[in-house]
Structures are given as structure tokens and as C-alpha cells.
Image (cartoon, rainbow, N blue to C red):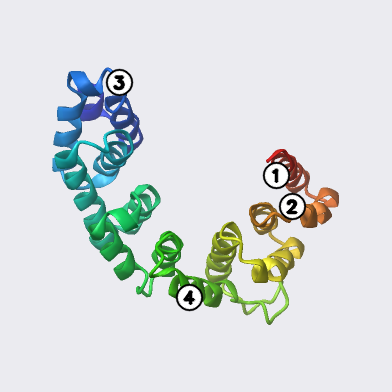
């Protein structure tokens, strides 16, 4: 595994980090390997190693402290890709002040691709929930006053709005349902299927039935799968 780590690309390093965290590898050299990987201080491998530690070794205080410190630094100062990775795997912010502080800083940024997932994580923090929800609603409302095919809409902002709607749907925010349903008639297949997924998260998957007659077979198939999975849940 150490040889794979040394010679491998980012994806391989992430897989190796997961392997190091598994028993009995963790107890027989994996812990030390993860410690060294985290000490490297940056990159997908170190971030993945930190995620493995906070998930698999929560009682190892020394290692968890190093891992959460790296994740917090990455959320604050890393590249966009690394920041999004760290935001996705960071532990419960309520239990880790350094992570909570990093999330609060990221939630105030102009870069909405970082801001939206940071706000999503703050929905789990009682003291920050209301403010985070308000910010997400503002972002989610982008473009709703126009036609869903309006040529003046910024595609990136529309994608971020769709992401924010999905986050709010997962949090049970019913007021975004009408906005999500507007995307069912979008000319873009990805936005349609994203809307179906958001409706499923909201518990309203049947509202995506319109997509079952979509002319694009990939949209029909993905919508059908989303609805079937939602019904089983």
C-alpha cells in the first residue's frame, strides 16, 4: 500500500487511505501511515486520510486533532477542488470548533461554489441554522422570476441555485418545491434530473412524473430510477 501511495495518482491515494483505515491494517501500520499522510498537509490523499481518521478512529484523540486541523485549513485556504472535498467529508461541526469556524468563514465568501456546500453543513448547527437557511433560500431563488429558458440567466448561477434547492429540499424546506418544479421544463437534461432528485429528497417524487414522457431516454430512465428508489424509502 505504501508503494501504491508513493507512485499513485490522487484517486489511488484516496483508495489507499481508505485501505489503511480498515481493520486489521489500521492496527498493523495503517495508523502510522495515515499520520504521515496527514502530516504531508495538502492534496486529495491527505484530505482522504483525514476523512478516514474522523470516520474510523474517533477515539484516537491525537490523530483526530491532526485530521480536523488539516480539514479546517483546507476549507479555509485550499484550492476550490480541495475545499469542496474537505467540505464533503468534514466531521460534525458542532463537535469540532475548528471545523465550525472554517465553515462560517467559507459561508461568507463570494465564491458560491464553496459558499453553498458550507451553508449546507451549517444547517446541522443549531446556532447557525436559521441564517444558513436564509442565505440558501436567496441563492435558490436565482432565476425564478424569469422563464426557465431565459437567455439572460447565468448557467453557473442556475446550477448553484439548483444545488441550493436540493440542499433545502433535503432539509425539508417545502417552499422550494415550486422552484424545483420549474426545472422540470428546463431544456437541459441535467437540470431536469437534478430536479427529480430534489423532489425525491423533499418527499414529493411523484411530482417528477412529467419526466417519464421526456423525449430524452436518459432523462426518462434516470427519473424512473429516482422515483422507484424514493418509493422504496
Q: Report how far apart the C-alphas of labels 3 and 1 lie in the structure.
A: 34 Å
Earlier along the polypeptide chain: callout 2 or callout 3? 3
| Whether residue 78 can be seen here | no
Tell me the quarter of the image containing the C terminus: top right
Identify residue for label 4: 135
Q: Report how far apart the C-alphas of labels 2 and 1 lie in the structure.
A: 7 Å
Identify residue for label 2: 205
Earlier along the polypeptide chain: callout 2 or callout 1? 2
Q: Left of 214 or right of it: where is 225?
A: left
Label 3: how many Cα within 10 Å (few below 14, some 14–19, many 20+): few
Asked if the residue under mark 1 is in contact with the one under mark 2, i.e. CB atoms within 8 Å, the reply is: yes
Residue 49 vs 201, above or below: the answer is above
Task: Determine the secondary structure under disc 3.
Answer: loop
- At x 17%, y 45%, the residue is 66
What numbered label is drawn on residue 230?
A: 1
- At x 77%, y 55%, the residue is 208
Earlier along the polypeptide chain: callout 4 or callout 2? 4
Task: Determine the secondary structure under disc 1.
Answer: helix
Name the quadrant containing residue 26.
Answer: top left
Asked if the residue under mark 3 is in contact with the one under mark 2, i.e. CB atoms within 8 Å, the reply is: no
Which x, y percent locates residue 90?
A: 33, 50
Earlier along the polypeptide chain: callout 1 or callout 4? 4
Label 4: how many Cα within 10 Å (few below 14, some 14–19, many 20+): some
Q: Report how far apart the C-alphas of labels 4 and 2 lie in the structure.
A: 25 Å
Earlier along the polypeptide chain: callout 4 or callout 3? 3
Q: Left of 164 or right of it: where is 76?
A: left
Amino acid at each position: 500500500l505504501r508503494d501504491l501511495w508513493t507512485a499513485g495518482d490522487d484517486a489511488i491515494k484516496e483508495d489507499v487511505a481508505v485501505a489503511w483505515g480498515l481493520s486489521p491494517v489500521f492496527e498493523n501500520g495503517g495508523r502510522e501511515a495515515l499520520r504521515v499522510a496527514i502530516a504531508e498537509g495538502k492534496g486529495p490523499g491527505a484530505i482522504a486520510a483525514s476523512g478516514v481518521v474522523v470516520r474510523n478512529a474517533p477515539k484516537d484523540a491525537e490523530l483526530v486533532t491532526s485530521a480536523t486541523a488539516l480539514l479546517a485549513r483546507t476549507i479555509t485556504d485550499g484550492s476550490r477542488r480541495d475545499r469542496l472535498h474537505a467540505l464533503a467529508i468534514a466531521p460534525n461541526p458542532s463537535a469540532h470548533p475548528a471545523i465550525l469556524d472554517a465553515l462560517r468563514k467559507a459561508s461568507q465568501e463570494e465564491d458560491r461554489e464553496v459558499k453553498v456546500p458550507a451553508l449546507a453543513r451549517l444547517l446541522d448547527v443549531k446556532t447557525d441554522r436559521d441564517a444558513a437557511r436564509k442565505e440558501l433560500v436567496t441563492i435558490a431563488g436565482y432565476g425564478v422570476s424569469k422563464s426557465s429558458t431565459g437567455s439572460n440567466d447565468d448557467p453557473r448561477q442556475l446550477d448553484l441555485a439548483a444545488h441550493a434547492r436540493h440542499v433545502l429540499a433535503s432539509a425539508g424546506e417545502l417552499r422550494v418545491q415550486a422552484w424545483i418544479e420549474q426545472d422540470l421544463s428546463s431544456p437541459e437534461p441535467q437540470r431536469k434530473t437534478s430536479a427529480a432528485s430534489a423532489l425525491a429528497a423533499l418527499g414529493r417524487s411523484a411530482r417528477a412524473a412529467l419526466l417519464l414522457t421526456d423525449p430524452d431516454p436518459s432523462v426518462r430512465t434516470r427519473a424512473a430510477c429516482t422515483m422507484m428508489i424514493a418509493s422504496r424509502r
